Image: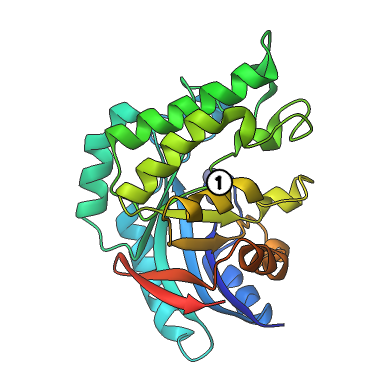
Amino acid sequence: MNILSDYHTHTSFSGDCNVPPELMIQEAVAHGIQHLCITDHMDYDYTDGGICFEFDEKEYFRRLLPLKERYKDQIDISIGIELGLQSYLSKKHHNLVFSNSFDFVIGSIHLVHSKDPYFPAYFKDREESDAYYEYFLCALQNLEAYSNFDTFGHLDYVVRYGPNQNLFYSYKKYQEILDEILRSLVKKEIGLEINTGGYKYGLGTPNPCQEIIMRYRELGGKIITLGSDAHLPEYLGYEMKQATELLKECGFSSHFIFKQRKPIEIPL
Ligand SMILES: [Zn+2]
Ligand SMILES: [Zn+2]
């Protein structure tokens, strides 16, 4: 099997992953991935659920740079990060991004007013559609506060965890706010991540769903990145073939990897 790229993966530098970076790299080689980006979680002030999602970025580069060199004949490795956006953190994120030479930065929303939709409490005592809307509103507000990142991670992440997941969910239902988000991404030249974790969660689509991917293109978006969000070796490159076919159906003929924050176009 040959997989073009996986630009969203985790290692033991993430609070919710126990797999050492070298093992993840060896498994990525075994999975036939050509371009791998390690994007561990940096979620400052994450207090929901009692896990710490911060790591020492100097140690991160100390560990990953020799591995990148050691495996360079087998796989192209980039060093990235997944920022957990919260609008008041923009200064801190700015400093982190500018004082380290990441190849690639994902901006993701994991917390909405300090609550992670991953936990049922986020949905408690309210309509599912209100909970989804609030997530998108938070995404939009974060984009206004801070946008120095390369791709927007799992745009409809909230849908993975809703009581009915995507049963009553559609792009149309949230069109107005989703269009605002997508227009903002296009204007700021930020990519849209196709996160195949959605397949793993049984949605039958990646995150975001097909209509959103098509709409991003319709509004002029070009920068697509592909990521499995693997926290375990078996999910590296997960359903990437299916995602690639979906992208072609949506009218895309290429996707992007990043080196030193510069996009590189790769045909699908
Ligand atoms: Zn994430
Ligand atoms: Zn992730």
Q: Residue furthest front?
A: 218
Residue on which disc 1 sits:
154
59, 150: nearer the viewer:
150
- Number of callouts: 1
Residue 233 x, y percent position in the rendering = 68, 65
Quarter for ligand 1?
A: top right
Instruction: Say if 220 sits above or below 171 in the image.
Output: below
Q: Residue at x 57, y 56 (%)?
A: 194
Label 1: which secondary element: loop
Q: Local crowd at mark 1 within 10 Å, few (<14), some, or many (≥20)?
A: many
Is residue 261 positioned above or below 165 on the image?
below
Whole-percent x, y for residue 199 in the image? 74, 52
Q: Is residue 168 visible?
A: yes
Does label 1 point to a residue whose CB lies under 8 Å from ligand 1? yes
Q: Quadrant of the C terminus?
A: bottom right
Residue at left offset 60%, top offset 51%: 17
Vertical placement of 114 versus 230: above or below?
above
